[in-house]
Amino acid sequence: MATQIVISNNEYIEVDGFHITWADKGTAMVVLPETTHYIIWNELPGQNEVQYKDVSTLKMTGNVDLNSTSDAVGSTTIADLLTWGETRKGQIETATADYSTAYENALNAWISGGGTEATFTESEAALAWDWSKTWIDYDPHYS
């Protein structure tokens, strides 16, 4: 389980210093109420809290202190968010590594066949590999 998480609802998530854009949150992220602005659970100075906003004005409406990982945030708990965050971080790292391995394999095959690294991006091997792929293509949990 992660130890720190900061969620800026609909913007980004930080899990133990690992940045996740909102688009990369994956399919298992719990839906947070639109009135949730930030969730802060970390070891930095200051209060761990949930910050709320008025969705029509986007102005802050108040904070609720968090004192325990069992404290509720919407329909979930801080502990659940920390567990989810650690899992999602691992999924992204695995997908990134899988992408890097596939790229290296395609590049090495191209070089073994007499090509050069400089010509790889325009090569038939690169085109067959589908140069437009990213780590997202290797993440079955991507949202």
Image (cartoon, grey):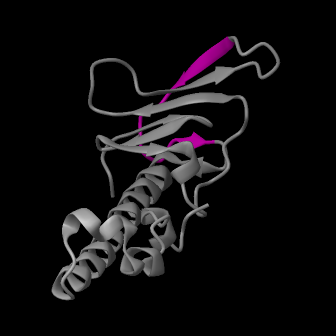
Say whether residue 89 is magenta. Answer: no
Residue 135 position by quadrant: bottom left
Where residue 8 sits in the image (x, y, percent)?
A: 53, 32
Is residue 104 shown left or right of residue 62?
A: left
Given residues 99 and 52, the one toward you in this image is 99
- Name the residue located 19 percent from the left edge and 71 percent from the top edge: 116
| Up-down relation of residue 69 to residue 122 (above or below) | above
Q: Is residue 143 left or right of residue 95?
A: right
Q: Residue at x 48, y 26 (%)?
A: 49
Residue located 37% across and 74% down the image: 123
In the image: residue 86, left or right of residue 81: left
Query: In percent of the image, x 59 and y 51: which residue is there?
Result: 76
Q: Which residues are magenta?
A: 60-73
The one of 79 and 90 positioned closer to us in this rendering: 90
Q: Is residue 9 above or below residue 72?
A: above
Question: Within the image, what quadrant is residue 92 found in?
Answer: bottom left
Quarter the N terminus occupies = bottom left
Position in image of residue 3 (x %, y %) = 30, 46
Q: Percent x, y for residue 61?
A: 68, 14
Q: Residue 46's x, y, as percent? A: 34, 17
Q: Where is 32 relative to 123, above or below?
A: above
